Amino acid sequence: MTVWFIALLQALLCVALAPLLIGWVRRVKARLQNRRGAPLLQPYADLRKLMVKETRVAHTASPLFRVAPYIVFVATWLACATVPLIALDLPTARIADIIVLVGLLALGRFFLALAGMDVGTAFGGLGASREMLISSLAEPAMLMAVFTLAMTAHSTSLVGVMEHHLTDGFLLRPSYLFAFGALVLVALAECGRIPVDNPTTHLELTMVHEAMLLEYTGRHLALMEWAAWIKLLLYGVLIVNVFLPWGIATAFTPAALALGLIAVVIKLALLGAALALGETLMAKMRLFRVPGFLNLALLLGLLGLLSHVILEVGA
């Protein structure tokens, strides 16, 4: 019973920490640009404001348009809950592996694209087509990167991969470096961050993710935005806990769990600062350059897989 309570606590932490992470990225980015910026907790206030607003729906919208925000939010939340956040060997992580994680993300993306096209506006269809283009190129690269890690640990379970890293200690393998680079590039594309997309843009012709949300208001928009923030947290936790799992709790004692929470918060804060620095130094690329960007991610993932196979054969 205690294990399931910790699993529920971890799932709730995914929802609670996602706005804090996006607020931290915006805060650091504003400071780097010599701006005061919004308060750190501003995303929570934005969610509260949207939740109490009236929800307006276009008269051409089908029931799918109303249901899609809930499906996208729940699918993204479940995907994030399968990634070990503060502790290993939880039931939610044991019953789901890397394949299930990718499937849940694909489910949320599918309904997000359908919702963008449902009303029949030009920008919704434009954003949905771009989202499908990016995801069709990003998913193979992500699978290639995670399969590299899975082959090293001989398991497709994220818990198995992390336990393997904790047991073997830090080994600087070429396959890990390639997989890390591929996963970072995929995370930037999947989360709609610069240089692939600009989450703060107001230019409709350059939008990808935001173009599918133009017709949403009220709590529907809040759920869609919240799901996007949870997705960013998911990729952040995936990067810091899979490649740097040190600090994560291997026992369910209060001290170990507290240490696991502090460790993941520090690692996510450093990753968020690096993301803010990168978005400050880089500009958004043109859309026709995105396939080349994701092809680079696929190439890095393939090089990581091949380098692992070569090292295994040589050994």
Image (spheres, rainbow, N blue to C red):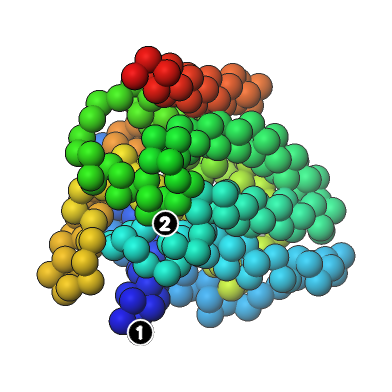
Residue 34, by quadrant, is top left
Looking at the image, residue 112 sits to the left or right of residue 177; the answer is right
| Residue 62 position in % (x across, y down) | 84, 68
Taking depth in this image into account, of 146 and 112 the one nearest to the observer is 146
Image height check: is 279 above or below 45? above
Q: Looking at the image, is 68 positioned above or below residue 314? A: below
Q: Residue at x 68, y 36 (%)?
A: 136
Q: Amino acid at mark 1?
A: Met
SS class of the residue under badge 2? loop
* 203 or 96, nearer to the observer: 96
108 displayed left or right of 7: right
Q: Quadrant of residue 173?
A: top left
Q: Quadrant of residue 74?
A: bottom right
Residue visible at 55% across and 37% down in the picture: 143
Badge 2: few (under 14), some or many (20 or more) residues near its Cα, within 10 Å? many
Image position of 261 with respect to 195: above or below? below
Q: Which mark is residue 83?
A: 2
Image x and y of residue 59, in percent: 85, 69
Q: Secondary structure at mark 1?
A: loop
Disc on the earlier residue, 2 or 1:
1
- Residue labelled with disc 1: 1
Answer above or below: position of 57 versus 163. below
Q: Residues within 10 Å of mark 1 (few under 14, many from 20)?
A: few
The amino acid beneath tag 2 is Val
The residue under the point 78% across, 67% down is 64
Hey, which residue is sitting farthest bottom in the picture? 1
